[in-house]
């Protein structure tokens, strides 16, 4: 009867689980920090654009008052009206464009959920690696059955993870310009 490397198998499974969990935790922390920084940046940009918009509105009110006392047939008045309309449209477009933050947040949230699922798959390796069940196995057939059970457990967790993410697109609703759907 040949000796089976049960101890080595247990150590391998435990190390794969430990290293995988550690690296996934780092990826998760990076994604969470990215989401935080993105949210902060978009909030600040939104505030800055609102401030610019308010300044333009105030400036326009003064211009309108000055122009009302000027000759209405002056071509510069029409130019100013055209600029006013463009600036308003540009500010609205920028604010709407900044809503991409919601789309990226959806992607980051989905990635974080996937990471949680992957951590569960890796934890299954660690659980099986630490199991006393492995050391109780004595023959090759039992080891092969054990490996098959481990493979089935990982496949089930992987399938459950994949099943929740069939929809691959992200969407933004309630925007002034309409709905956006990506991917």
Image (cartoon, rainbow, N blue to C red):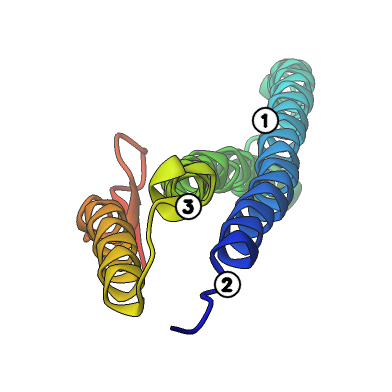
Q: Is residue 26 above or below residue 11?
A: above
Res. 89 visible in picture:
yes
Return the residue nearer the eye: 79 or 135: 135
Return the residue nearer the eye: 106 or 75: 106
Return the residue nearer the eye: 158 or 47: 158
For disc 3, the marked residue is 135
At which x and y percent is residue 169? 32, 60
Query: What is the CA distance from the residue labelled 3 to the residue labelled 2?
Result: 10 Å
Residue name at image x 42 percent, y 48 percent:
124
Circle 1 sits in a helix, a strand or a loop, which is it?
helix
Quadrant of residue 53 in the image? Answer: top right
Mark 3 packing: few (<14 Cα in 10 Å), some, or many (20+)?
Answer: some
At which x and y percent is residue 44? 77, 25
Front tag of 1 and 2? 2
At which x and y percent is residue 139? 35, 72
Mark 1 packing: few (<14 Cα in 10 Å), some, or many (20+)?
Answer: some
For disc 1, the marked residue is 39
For disc 2, the marked residue is 5
Query: What is the CA distance from the residue labelled 1 to the residue labelled 2?
Result: 51 Å
Left of 2 or right of it: where is 158? left
Front tag of 3 and 1? 3
Res. 96 visible in picture:
no
At which x and y percent is residue 100? 54, 47
């Amino acid at each position: 009867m040949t000796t089976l490397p049960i101890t080595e198998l247990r150590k391998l499974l435990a190390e794969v689980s430990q290293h995988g969990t550690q690296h996934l935790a780092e990826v998760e922390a990076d994604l969470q920090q990215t989401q935080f920084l993105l949210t902060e940046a978009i909030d600040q940009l939104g505030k800055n654009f609102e401030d610019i918009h308010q300044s333009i509105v105030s400036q326009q009110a003064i211009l309108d008052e000055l122009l009302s006392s000027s000759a209405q047939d002056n071509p510069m008045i029409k130019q100013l009206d055209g600029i006013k309309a463009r600036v308003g449209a540009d500010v609205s477009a920028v604010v709407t464009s900044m809503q991409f933050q919601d789309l990226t947040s959806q992607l980051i949230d989905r990635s974080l959920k996937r990471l949680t699922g992957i951590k569960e798959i890796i934890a299954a390796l660690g659980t099986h690696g630490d199991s006393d069940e492995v050391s109780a196995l004595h023959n090759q057939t039992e080891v092969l059955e054990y490996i098959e059970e481990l493979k089935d457990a990982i496949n089930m967790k992987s399938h459950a993870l994949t099943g929740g993410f069939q929809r691959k697109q992200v969407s933004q609703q309630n925007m002034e310009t309409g709905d956006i759907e990506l991917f």
